[in-house]
Image (cartoon, coloured by chain):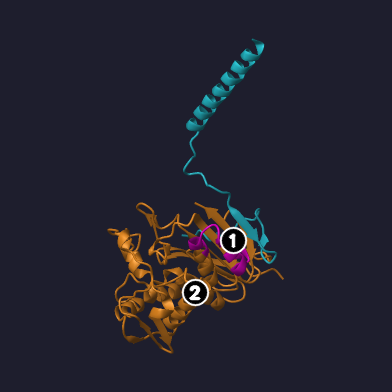
Chain colours: A cyan, B orange
Amino acid sequence: MRSLLLKAGATALTLATTVVSAHYVAAHLKNPAAPLHPTVLSVAPSVRQAPDVKPVTSTYAS
Amino acid sequence: MPPDPIGEHRFDAMGTTCSVFASGVSSANLRRTEMQVRELAARLTRFDPDSELSRFNAAAGEWTPVSPELEALLRESLRAFEMSAGLVNVAVLPSMVAIGYTRTLADGPTDASPWSAQSAPPLPDVLKVAVGMARLSPGVGIDLGGIAKGWMADRLCARLGPNALVNLGGDLRARGAGPDGDGWPVGLGETTVLLDDHAAATSSALRRRWGDGLHHVIDPRTGRPAASGLAEVSVVTRTAVDAEIVAKAALIAGAKLAPAFCAAHAEAWWLRPS
């Protein structure tokens, strides 16, 4: 009897977890505006970075 | 001895913003650079039917006399094609027209029929350049918007002396030690880099866009706006014309190939996925 109760409990827990997970996934659809991957920055030693320096201009002039 | 003060001049030309910086150069000389930009742009625009480029396009099928400047740009176009394995191809004018980019975007795009766009022919097959002469194959048109600004920035920066920066719509060339002696601080992607005798450019599918998926970066393999998984590519190279070529080729090549291409041709790069 106890074994049967344990099996029933485990089954119920599994089903509940499945339902809750499915609900969570459906409620958190991917933001289409979010980038799929992180940006990539690579800088060779011949170019120095100075993120704290205010640029005089940029490649986004237009 | 303190460094010479940096002179600065900003202006709008070629449908974009431009800026010129130099030390030890008079304000009159900086303004003269603007005049040189306007003079070259007037000859190289495809939006004026009387420009040298438009007349060259209209004469497709015939050997046509070309100015030294247009000849140099046509040779650069052939080099860009080879360097980019065909991804930078100035013979995309029919595609530009098909997507409605028939006039300056300040005047707005016209009706688009992108489904009619076709892949661009291999440039060496349709463009022949000789000394003072050039020939386009019949039915071919070229748009120099992908390399002209960088080429002009290289030339004009050299004229401004040993410590100068010329930025033509984001295609820029720097020479010398900059305002504080450690290079010209330039915004690149989400960081700042110090450039001395370097150039930089960004190619973007996020700007100059309109309609559903329509923008000005054409993939010559399809004849349609590039959809490669990359939204922007910024690079640092030694010349501005190379920066334009590398950034555009990487943007069209896409996220898988761009890192290797940039590693081969650039000293710094920033990739922004779509």
Outermost residue toward the left in this view: B111
Answer above or below: position of B44 versus A31.
below
Q: Amino acid at mark 2?
A: Ala
The subunit letter for the residue under badge 1 reads B
In this orientation, which residue lies closer to the viewer: A5 or B194? A5
- Residue at screen point 57% across, 24% down: A17
Q: Residue at x 43, y 59 (%)?
A: B226
Q: Is residue B41 magenta?
A: no
Magenta part of the protein: which range?
B250-269
Q: In this view of the protein, which residue sits in the foreground, B225 or B48? A: B225
Crowdedness near tag 2: few (<14), some (14–19) or many (≥20) residues, C-alpha within 10 Å: many
Can the viewer see residue B14 in this picture? yes
Identity of the residue drawn at 54% across and 26% down:
A18
| In front of the other: B147 or B229 | B229
In this orientation, does residue B28 appear? no
In the rendered structure, find residue B80 and report the number of the disc placed on it: 2
Q: Main secondary structure of the magenta part?
A: helix
Give how far apart the Cα atoms at labels 1 and 2 are: 18 Å
What subunit carries mark 2? B
Residue B128, relative to residue B175: is it above or below? below
The residue under label 1 is B259
Q: Earlier in the sequence, mark 1 or mark 2?
A: 2
Asked whether the residues under marks 1 and 2 belong to the same chain, the reply is yes
Q: For residue B59, which quarter of the picture?
A: bottom left
For mark 2, give the secondary structure. helix
- Expressed as whole percent of the image width and height from the top left, the position of residue B157 reads 55, 74
Q: Amino acid at mark 1?
A: Pro
Q: In the image, is B99 to the left or to the right of B243?
A: left
The quadrant of the image that shows the N terminus of chain B is bottom right
